[in-house]
Amino acid sequence: MCVLLVLLLIVNVQRAALDHRQVSIDFEQAFRDGRLLPRFWTSTGMCPPAPREKAADFLLSNDSLLNFEIIGGLPNAGLKYVRIHWLLEMIQFSHYDENKLLFYNFSRLDALLDKIYEYGLHPGFELMGAPGNIYPMEKKRRFSYFWTDLTMQIALRYLHRFGVEYVANWRFETWNEPDLKNYNTLNFTTDEYINYLQSVRLGLDAAGRLLNNIHLPLRGPAGLFRTEQNHPFCWTALQLCNDYPRNCPFDVISFHRKGSGTRADEIVNGESMLMNQIWDKYPNLLEFKYSNDEADPVAGWSTPREFQSNMKYGAMLVSTVLQHWSTKTNSVQSHLESISHDNGFLSYHPFEFDQRTLLARFQMNDTKPKHVQFVVKPVYSSLGMLTNLGPQATDTLFLEGNLSYIVSYNRDPFYSCVLLSLSNDTFDPTTKRSNITLKFAIAEESTKRRIGYIVEGLQESLNDPNSIWIHYGKPSYPTADQFASMRTVQFPSVLKGPEMVSANTKNISLNLNLRAPWIVMVRLCSEMVPAPSQVTNIRIRRIYTYEAVIFWSEEPSVTRCIVGYEVWFRADQTQWIQINSGHCTPFLWFQFVSNTTIGLTGLYRVRSVDMFGRYGAFSETKYFNG
Ligand SMILES: *[C@@H]1O[C@H](CO)[C@@H](O)[C@H](O)[C@H]1NC(C)=O
Ligand SMILES: *[C@@H]1O[C@H](CO)[C@@H](O)[C@H](O)[C@H]1NC(C)=O
Ligand SMILES: *[C@@H]1O[C@H](CO)[C@@H](O)[C@H](O)[C@H]1NC(C)=O
Ligand SMILES: *[C@@H]1O[C@H](CO)[C@@H](O)[C@H](O)[C@H]1NC(C)=O
Ligand SMILES: *[C@@H]1O[C@H](CO)[C@@H](O)[C@H](O)[C@H]1NC(C)=O
Ligand SMILES: *[C@@H]1O[C@H](CO)[C@@H](O)[C@H](O)[C@H]1NC(C)=O
Ligand SMILES: *[C@@H]1O[C@H](CO)[C@@H](O)[C@H](O)[C@H]1NC(C)=O
Ligand SMILES: *[C@@H]1O[C@H](CO)[C@@H](O)[C@H](O)[C@H]1NC(C)=O
Ligand SMILES: *[C@@H]1O[C@H](CO)[C@@H](O)[C@H](O)[C@H]1NC(C)=O
């Protein structure tokens, strides 16, 4: 259970003005207004640091794998895709055979993709980089063949390795920002670039033909689309798509539009401007799906910024999603397919919390061996809240004073996740406190059985591990106690419930006192929703001598009435004990800090519990030899 700890040490006792208001939600109305809500925001991205030739060492490092596994640790595929630059640098050229066919060593790429698969993620597979030293030799003689063959080999290899269903859900994409000098490492000319696009498309088609004619979608050109003069590759690619739609290599047009670092709505506005420019020039692209796969508040992931360290960024990400949903429902951007947040990076000292990342990384160089500790930032938890949104939703409502909300639901069995947020973007809200009364009018059809509800929230300074770190004087190597106190506030807190109302109850009223910026999620569940399922795939990762992270998996569901998970452990010759009592465990992992008495060796099992107190079956037990 996630008890809200008011750490008096760090909370400024503010007597500032109060934002006092009432929000009424009528489900009969919501059911009339709602539309299908596609989960268009569930992607993150990252780039291995220079030199790109060392991409494999970085991506397969302990820190990077743990980062990916935590990214995969949100329920309901809260983050489903991870878009990664320079993957082709992980492949080694092996040899030519007597027919001059190209053979590669894929072992390092295999190792990474096996992990991504195990973590329940899907790659945003950018066909970017080049294996070893082979490209310069092939470039002159067999340019198209080289790209078609390499793409086909990759697609076929992983279709066979992981199956059609999984790989058909990958997001293959062409070279990232190809017009930029620092990305165009192969010195493509415009003609070569267009040739590259056509060749990789042919490679995917060739692989698909060998597997029942499946179509593997391709995204691109992943460009910034500045002036045509400076960014000729991307504009020329779209020209081609406009002039010869059937020869267009792309299924989804991708581009990057970020804000300038002040307001979330700069992103959605920038997109609309760009798309209008594109549609004016290329009217045949009006019906194309498109994606802003770097939809961030500001460029430059590693630049430290205060707003990225705390609730502001978490709330901005929620605003970004709600604003996009609004433009999608109002047909301004009805063909927007998805957005991606480019925040899957690993932060580094001394900017543990301040960079554009989901997690704060602490490289513990003072221990032998060295090890890594991650602390969750509010932005990760805000994605964890968004994952509970139901399959249908009303348009976003934007109220005065920067309050916005969305009512999502599943009608039968009744489930609702109402997400509200108060955010003044990168600025401090002038009103630091909100007193909100939420009034729900339940639809007649949903009241046949009991309804359970739970209210969870992320609030300024209360769910802010960074402020605790600052309080301790920003130690490079926090102590175990300091990590423990940062972790008590890293997840959404339960503000009310779980509570039940009896069948036939029509109205529910809740009063909340909140510190802004905040995000609040109210989940309502009919008891008709089935009890939770069994969790699977228990994985134990050692962090340090007596410390491990336990991960598990769970089938996605359109109704999420689960309030948390219980993690149980049994050392040799002892009883089962619940090791996460008193720790908030809303997501698919738990960091277990054990001790010399009980150690880590033994059996582990996990089960979920929902708001009616119903348990899922225990997972299979997993033995860990610590
Ligand atoms: C990676 O983690 C493993 C298991 O915890 C550990 O044995 C190994 O030393 C770590 N590697 C590095 C380079 O830190
Ligand atoms: C492929 O590369 C891996 C690591 O880079 C190496 O260990 C392995 O021996 C190579 N395999 C072959 C067949 O050369
Ligand atoms: C691309 O051009 C740069 C600068 O002229 C050169 O250093 C580099 O080797 C070239 N790369 C390839 C793959 O030709
Ligand atoms: C907050 O209000 C300002 C001024 O009306 C507006 O420009 C901005 O987009 C709003 N931000 C959010 C997240 O609602
Ligand atoms: C948001 O911040 C701006 C700039 O500080 C301020 O003028 C405005 O009143 C704030 N809006 C709200 C709703 O807090
Ligand atoms: C919040 O508003 C409710 C209802 O108007 C009121 O009963 C309560 O006292 C208020 N709380 C605070 C802290 O102002
Ligand atoms: C319940 O809510 C509806 C709609 O908001 C309202 O018309 C009605 O008066 C409320 N009933 C009670 C008993 O509060
Ligand atoms: C820990 O070591 C890494 C290199 O392995 C370095 O980048 C980092 O700055 C070090 N951390 C501290 C706190 O010195
Ligand atoms: C060791 O951890 C177990 C489980 O958390 C706890 O019950 C026990 O009291 C701890 N022992 C010591 C000496 O801290």
Image: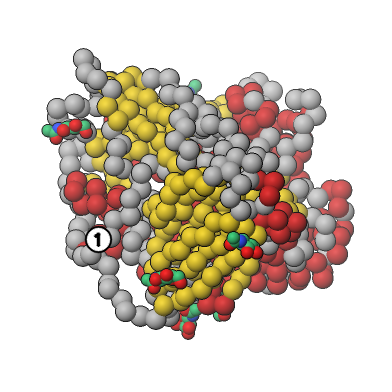
Q: Classify 10 Å Cα crowding around label 1: few (below 14), some (14-19), many (20 and above).
A: few
Does residue 604 lie above or below 409 as drawn? above
Most foreground residue, 474 or 103: 474
**Please, which colouring scheme is shown?**
secondary structure
Most foreground residue, 518 or 200: 518
Q: Residue at horizontal 29%, vertical 42%?
A: 582
- Element marked by disc 1: loop
**Residue 212 in view:** yes
Q: Residue at horizontal 50%, vertical 66%?
A: 437
> Residue 499 at x, y = what percent?
46, 47
Most foreground residue, 241 or 429: 429
- Residue farthest top in this picture: 573
Does residue 244 lie above or below 204 as drawn? below
Q: Is residue 265 left or right of residue 302?
A: right
Q: Residue at horizontal 84%, vertical 48%?
A: 247
> Residue 47 at x, y = what percent?
48, 51
Q: Quadrant for the C terminus, please.
A: top left
**Residue 291 in view:** no
* Location of mark 1 (residue): 7
Image quadrant in which you'd find residue 160? top right
Q: Is residue 158 left or right of residue 285?
A: left
Question: Which amino acid is tagged 1?
Answer: Leu
Image quadrant in which you'd find residue 311? bottom left
> Residue 455 at x, y = what percent?
46, 53
Most foreground residue, 262 or 17: 17
Does residue 32 lie above or below 619 as drawn? below
> Residue 384 at x, y = what percent?
48, 49
